[in-house]
Amino acid sequence: MAGEPVNVNEFEELAKEALPKMNYDYFSGGAEDEYTLKENVEAFKRISIQPRILVDVSKINMSTTILGYKTSSPIMIAPTGLHKLAHPAGEIATARAAAASDTIMALSFASSCTLEEVASSCNAVRFFQLYVYKRRDVSELIVQRAERNGFKAIIVTVDAPRFGRREADIKNKMIIPPMANLKGVISHEVVSDKGSELQAYVSATKDASLSWKDIAWLKSITNLPVLIKGVLTSEDALKAVEVGVSGIVVSNHGARQLDYSPATITVLEEVVSAVQGKIPVLVDGGVRRGTDVFKALARGAQAVMIGRPVVYGLSAKGENGVKTVINMLKDELELTMALAGCCTVKDITRQHVRTEHDRH
Ligand code: FNR
């Protein structure tokens, strides 16, 4: 691609040019037909923004608080695995970019840098994403490590009792090179040397028996707030409130797990109305523009998380690339707010967006 990238999609082009095919396919791919993968992005396009005019927008303030932590914008970094497949500096570069742009980062359980390395390399507010091990004692040790290293919340991902069928990875015979191994977070004794192969790692870690009672257990072993990632229905949102979690992430895992699960932006509103403001609702999946962030907020999300845009930035230009991607989305959001007549994130309401189903 000629010239500097001017949007997230152009960062994806650069990432594709920069990376070996196996790595790019791992980051960009989704499950099976990749129907949900496309829908996550397309569904945003079916929502239009209704601007209000003649509002004094000479000062825009995008800052907000997430679980009590002040942040420069309602954009967070989603947990994504294996950043060393994007760039040799891996999650350390991502974390530094998060700190530099005053953005909260969720570190993946499948991090290729150790949790300690990430913690000591930046002072960003960090959350830790957990997959619950078959061996609960090992999970407990990992949660303790996260606590000790200053992570501020546990995001437990619950949409992956089995590994989604990602056909590009199957075709590429995806392996995890030793430099990007998964020993950053997970325990050597559980994965042993099979940790260099994705399926072996997954079968060692994923626990298909995980259920609601385990969320109560998880809450009992930590003082950190626990969020559930992978909620797509109002019924599960209500259960999440009932078990007393501190927040929900509406997510279909970036369309990498259950294909034909709904685009997250289409179910966000029903989850938000079920939760009735009792706990914060975050959303991820398909956010590629500041206008997407605006739409998610208008539909009731407290913040959005971005997955692929971050790894594309990292692949193309390392730490600077991640910073640029975050700043691009922030600039786009700021512009959208100004053009739509919203000075603060609280000013963004349901009246600012419409779909063809809305009658106003
Ligand atoms: C992910 N995601 C993810 N989620 C999680 O809870 N733990 C993980 O280790 C990973 N790993 C991972 C790797 C890669 C390459 C991708 C693209 C995604 C899902 C991630 O947190 C988030 O839900 C999606 O990435 C959001 O969609 P977008 O922004 O990528 O469209």
Image (spheres, helix red, strand yellow):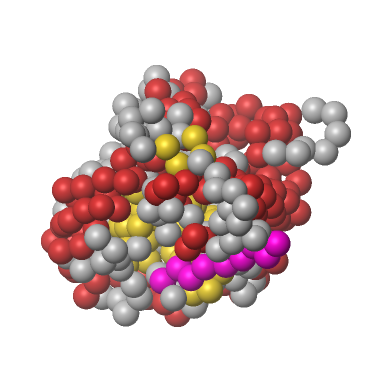
Which stretch did the figure color magenta? Answer: 58-67
For image coordinates 43% across by 53% down, the residue present is 349
- Which residue is at the far right? 3
Nearest to the observer: residue 351 or residue 198: 351
Nearest to the observer: residue 53 or residue 210: 53
- Which residue is at the far front? 54
Q: Is residue 178 left or right of residue 226?
A: right
Nearest to the observer: residue 226 or residue 298: 298
> How far across and how far down the image is residue 246, in percent?
30, 68
For image coordinates 45% across by 29% down, the residue present is 46
Q: Is residue 107 left or right of residue 72?
A: left
Q: Is residue 327 left or right of residue 146?
A: right
> How far across and how far down the image is residue 352, in percent?
47, 46
Q: Is residue 64 magenta?
A: yes
Q: Is residue 89 visible?
A: no
Quadrant that contains the N terminus: top right
